[in-house]
Image (tube, grey):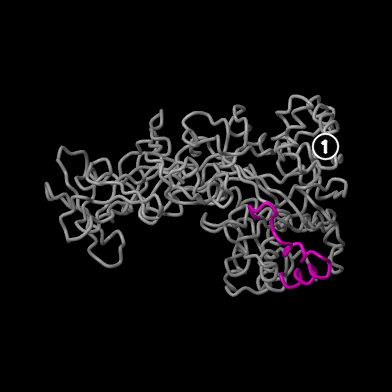
Amino acid sequence: MRSASSRARVGELRPSQLLFTFGVGAIVDLPHLSVMVMGLDDWPTESSLDVHEERLLAAVKKELGSQVASLRTPPVELDSTGMTSNPFDGEAHIGVPVAPFPRWVLCPRCRLLAPLNSDLFQLKIDPFRKDRTRYIHTACNHGTGKSPAVVPARFLVACTHGHLDDFPWVEFVHRGPTDCRYSLRLYELGASGEAADVEIKCVVCGKTRRIAEAFEQGKAHMPACRGRWPHQRTFAEESCQVKNVTPILLGASNSWFPVTLSALSMPTTTDQLAQRVDAHWGVLQNAANLQNVGLLRQIGQLQSFAQYTDEQIWDMLQRKRDGLLEATREHTDLKDPEWEVFSCPAPSRNNDHLQLREVDPPSAYTTYFDKVVLVERLREVRALTGFTRIESPGDYNDSGELPEEKRAPLSRTAPVWVPTCQVRGEGIFIQFCEAAIESWVQRLADLDQEFREAHRQWRTIRKLDPDAGYPTLRYVLLHSLAHALIRQLSLECGYTTASLRERIYSRPPGGDQQPMAGFLIYTAAPDSEGTLGGLVSLGDPQSLGRHLDQALEAIRLCASDPLCAEDHPYRDGLTLHGAACHACLHAPETSCERGNKYLDRSVLVPTVEQKHVAFFEV
């Protein structure tokens, strides 16, 4: 990262963090600074790379508009080590721009609370030690020695429409607009640091007020939202409709939620050369003639085409441009092409991005599973399309259902590209027997209706269409087993639970589209070679059967029973799951695609409360 004002390097983040933890509009806590990642208008594109994934790009266009032309990585240095010997080189300035936020800071000695633009603070940059970049209070009259480094004020205000602003310190302490030529001090009267012990005082007029009042009696004490977009250095064109802002703490987990889309790279043809051309289309699409192909080979861009001649590559390029390759059917769901490939694995479709190997299901589960596929190599591309504050996008079925007014934009104008990262890894795909799962669903019509009603009430409270997006009881079954297996596999595969992810493929029969019943458990890393095979090695029939047995046995009894087993799908509008809790089925946020909703271990095995709804009889 680099400061947008000084262009000084102030910290480092991994590419995946710029999408899922500290993306556009998020606040990054550095040793002596708190900064905000700026919008895409300020990001340099000359040092970023194109990522080719047509299915994902089409999905992004559907959400953000047809003007989106490409998926690009964050700015990267040419030196893969991320180190530069001279901090004054131009390469040392490559990075994602940030700006100090919040703009109000506190002197820890004299307790002065003032904005950075008050000319009371000076930025000190150490080009050789990025972690020492800081603001100091040069006029501090308390204590002796060097001027103290100031710290960011730890209270902010936000709204559900994605706006974020500095806490209204002046208006808050004066209980409204004032003409006072204020000078504020912030005192912590207790050791706990809680809001009840934090007092703000104006030393000019003598007025004081406890910060706790901002969090009491709803939000009646807070002003209307100003519609500020600090990552764009501007305010919303239309006034925000939120009457009272929500006070939050700096670093609060609800201050930023990413809205992302992801897709697994799937082959669109069985022709190996066509697959390679498609995978490297970002490089090859600019080749205007045969000579350009030769130049690309000379500069090392065609290492994957060593067994093909320039003429063969050029001929395939022309066929792709003329639309003569196998037609790719358009899909309304990103998961449809993935299901088609996983459910019918063909060795001829294996390529650099995807390696599949089908194995037999465990002998004890042949009546439940149709297919087990070991995904020895996969590539996932993830794109950031926006973000929310206060409310998580996980409450919606997909990002396309998220109300437009709650999705904060990535740039001042409609984006022509979005930040993207690609990761490589491995996984295990399990396909259920359609006849077995459909027979089970038909037998449990009452439980299906209970989950459906819980789904309707959940969405009604959140002012969403109550009849839309119900995933059906088969999704509850698939989702619950995926969670149970993730917890079990993490004990032996070498990856933590948070490193494993699920991808659920669920669709009931009926309509024009084929039914789906299966899931993929996978792990991925940003390294060019991906992961090391610790997960896929557990997919062999004997090993997988043992882990399935242990996973099902582990959830028969929960440490929170009988309370956990007595849970119903809907309880006071706070949950949407049955017998599931953090002691038995809940997974980390990075692992679950539905925020730990639509889970119930009683659909897998008998529990102390439910004996007759379990799918498995092993």
Q: Which residues are magenta?
A: 525-551
Q: Is residue 172 left or right of residue 465?
A: left
Count numbered badges in the picture.
1
Figure quadrant of residue 198? bottom left
- Image quadrant holding the C terminus, namely bottom right
Name the foreground residue: 467 vs 580: 580
Residue reaching furthest to the left: 205
Image: 340 above or below 610: above
Q: Position of residue 87 (x, y in %)?
A: 44, 47
Image height of 9 relative to 131, above or below? above
What's the residue at 54%, 31% (across, down)?
Answer: 415
Q: Position of residue 187 (x, y in %)?
A: 22, 58
Q: Position of residue 157 (x, y in %)?
A: 35, 46
Q: Is 332 inside the magenta-drawn segment? A: no
Mark 1 is on which residue type?
Ala
Q: Toward which corner of the image does residue 88 lie, by quadrant? A: top left
Q: Which residue is mark 1?
A: 274
Q: Going by the image, does 589 lie left or right of 168? A: right
| On screen, residue 548 above or below 106 | below
Q: Which residue occupies 31% across, 49% down?
A: 124
Drawn side of residue 119 relative to residue 608, left or right: left
The picture quadrant where one finds residue 558 is: bottom right
Q: Secondary structure at mark 1?
A: helix
Foreground pick, 327 / 168:
327
Residue 143 at what x, y percent from top left? Answer: 17, 61
Graded by Cα atoms within 10 Å as few (under 14), some (14 to 19) or many (20 or more), the crowding at tag 1 reads: many
